[in-house]
Amino acid sequence: MRTFRLAAFIGGLGLLAWLVMRSGPARLYADLLKVGWWMAALLAIAAVRNGVRAEAVRLALGDDRRKFSFSKIYLVLLVSEAVKFVAVAGLVFGEAAKGWLLGRRVSGPRAVSTVMVDVLLYYLTAALFALGAIGTFFALYPASGAARRAGVAGAAVVAGAVGLGVVAFRRRWLGARRVVAPLARWGLVRRPETIDRMEEIDAQMFGFYHRHRAAFRGILALDFAAHFLSAFEVTAILWLLGLGLHFAGGVVIEGFTKLVETGGLLVPGDVGLYQGGTGLIFRAMGYTVATGVSVGIIRQIRSILWAGVGFLLLLMPGLEVWRAKRHEPRFPA
């Protein structure tokens, strides 16, 4: 895994270097100068977005959300995002870090079910947002017949994935119990309390909607708000570069960017893949690839700065969220 991670990172860096040389280092440097101290405003937009996501995570805690203040959840989210940014399969390790930190104050099953509810609803709304972006693109921008067919095929794939995910959830194909039961039959899990905990996780996760409908609707609204804030960030960057873009265009770019980010989960920080994908998106919308690469690099710099904040928090063991101990029995191995 370490070898693969290193190879993926080096490959991403090579792709990024090629994109920079093709776009023109002088052009990219000029775009960075145009942003200048306005980077603080982009960081502020990201701070608001992080706050929206933090509140969504807090709602996903259900009855245990009162054990966390908003500020503590915000810290947990920053650390989780920092881990996602640097790790191969960052989604897995980032969410594991989130679950571990939440588990300092709540039971293991509650921490795991919270992470699962948060991830499932966030990516559900991201997929729906991407579908809306595809429709908006074809409504606002001219495209060839081949591009339209590709767009329809892409929309069909996303819609199919959403439908499959809904069916899988309703039939509990994603349940922790389904994972542990075969292991128990094979003798790999011998402790009965482990199976009991898995059933508790399933009960909390699959029953969340029925027990916390207001929180469920609130999470959906907050996740959509986070996606629209990301689209607003794209729009703001293009205005700073002197390429005014209406907000609907920002929604299109952000929607397609989510598809690129999904494809780059194995590369730490999406280095190279993110900028290249952004360049292709901008080209499809009538801009130059260099503009897309510039926007991708600017957003990557913002992500790096916030990831740095998350890692600084990891180096501060005196924070109360780190010190807190659970009173419930620890999650069994």
Image (cartoon, rainbow, N blue to C red):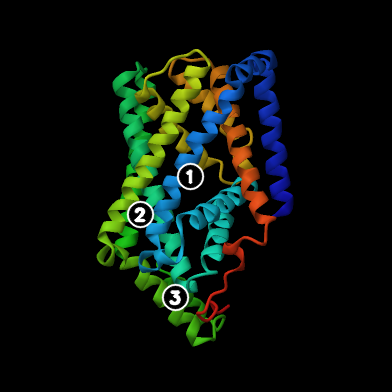
Q: Which of disc 1 and disc 3 is earlier in sequence?
A: 1
| Residue found at x 35% / y 30% | 134
Q: Nearer the viewer, mark 2 or mark 1?
A: 1
Vertical comparison of 250 with 286: above or below:
below
**Which residue carries the number 1 mark?**
50
Residue 89 visible in rendering: no
User: Do residues under tags 3 and 2 come within 8 Å of each other at their CB atoms?
Assistant: no
Residue type at the position of mark 3: Met
| Residue found at x 68% / y 57% | 316
Q: CA distance from mark 3 to mark 1?
A: 30 Å
Left or right? Give the position of 1 relative to 324. Answer: right
Q: CA distance from mark 3 to mark 2?
A: 20 Å
- Return the mark for residue 198: 3
| Residue found at x 43% / y 15% | 244
Q: Nearer the viewer, mark 3 or mark 1?
A: 1
**Which residue carries the number 2 mark?**
165
Q: Disc 1 on helix, strand or loop? A: helix
Q: 266 or 39: nearer the eye?
A: 39
Q: Residues within 10 Å of mark 2 (few under 14, many from 20)?
A: some
Residue type at the position of mark 2: Gly
State the quadrant of the C terminus: bottom right
